[in-house]
Image: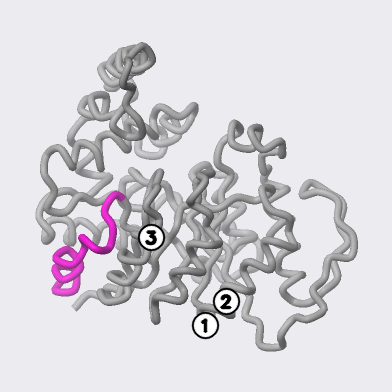
Amino acid sequence: MADVSLLGAYVIPGPATDVRHALVEAEAADRLGLGAVWESELQSIVKDAGAICGYLAHATTNVRIGTSITHFTLRHPMVQASWGATMQALSGNRYEFGFGRSFAMLFASHGVPQPTLAMMADYATILRQIWRGEPVTYSGPAGTYKDMVYRDRPDELVPPPMHLAAIGPKTLDLAGRCFDGVFLHPFMTPRAVAAKTKIVRDAAERAGRDPASIKIYHELVAAPDMTEDEVDEVIGARIAAYFALPGLGDLILQANGWDGSRLDGYRETLARSLAANESSERPLKGRKLYIEAGRHFPPEWIAESAVVGTPSDCAEGIAPFLDAGADEIILHGVTADRLGPMVEAFAQL
């Protein structure tokens, strides 16, 4: 019997306006025995990660709750520290922080600097010091702060784990040295997962940490028992949108050893789709814009980096990623309220 607590799921992934559906999804994850649910914070008027995670903590009993991801620099360290400690108190120590670098345009729109490696390392140290009750006076890459301390810190406070989303070797190295875990990017093959896991664990060992203590989360896009149209949106459009972000597609190609020349059809179709959408009276929004371009990805790439098919097919497809070194799998593209048959099939493995 496989341990279903090795599986987690996103709640309300992507842009969302009906954020109350996060409750339906988290309750389903709790009933299924999943290990965790994760909220990916977008800068949306109704998708604040702190509010949503607090809502889920009240409605669930066992499932861990975390962000995958929120961002450094968009909140003051005292606010981040209070958020994490309050969530631990509300959830019975079931909260986990996930952070990421995101993209320059996000931070430019807020008028704050994009996190650097040095800044993220120092932020992690600062938060741990605040949680320990130590006064923090700091001037460096993470900013300038004086006498940051909470004098009403409860003695039983358990600091939340902090994880870092990473794809490149320098950020993976940072995760191994300074964080409690790492989120590996979707559409990595098992071989890429193994290579990136090694970077993280080697960095932890060089830093004098127990390599096995750094948790490896792999984000695996799944489409169990979905229609062809649903697969186009959940799988094809998602990878097409990732490759449309500057530089990200190149990192995925490099990690997987894929030949970028095979994407000429994707690039041409994407350019036509974007141009047509710009002049349309009814422009497409979100992933729907990328559906046609996503159909040009080699099917064998999808087969080795995502799981598609019957619930049993998808359940069996998880094993290679666990064998490659992932400690837990975060299922992406499908929410927990649709995961019952796949989780049941996984449990029977």
**Are the two marked residues, 3 and 1, in contact with CB atoms closer than 8 angstroms?**
no
Count of numbered tags = 3
**Are the two marked residues, 1 and 2, in contact with CB atoms closer than 8 angstroms?**
yes
Residue 198, how many percent across, how many down? 47, 55
For the C terminus, the image quarter is bottom left
Q: Which mark is residue 114?
A: none
Residue 64 located left or right of residue 338: right
Depth check, front residue: 331 or 274? 274
Give the CA distance from mark 2 to mark 3: 21 Å
Q: What residue sits right under mark 3 in the picture?
A: 20
Q: What residue sits right under mark 2 in the picture?
A: 88
Splitting the image into 4 quarters, where does residue 336 fall? Answer: bottom left
Residue 95 located left or right of residue 119: left
Residue drawn at x 54%, y 44% as measured from the top left? 43
Q: What residue sits right under mark 1 in the picture?
A: 92
Please, what is the three-letter code of the amino acid marked with disc 2? Gln
Q: Secondary structure at mark 2?
A: helix
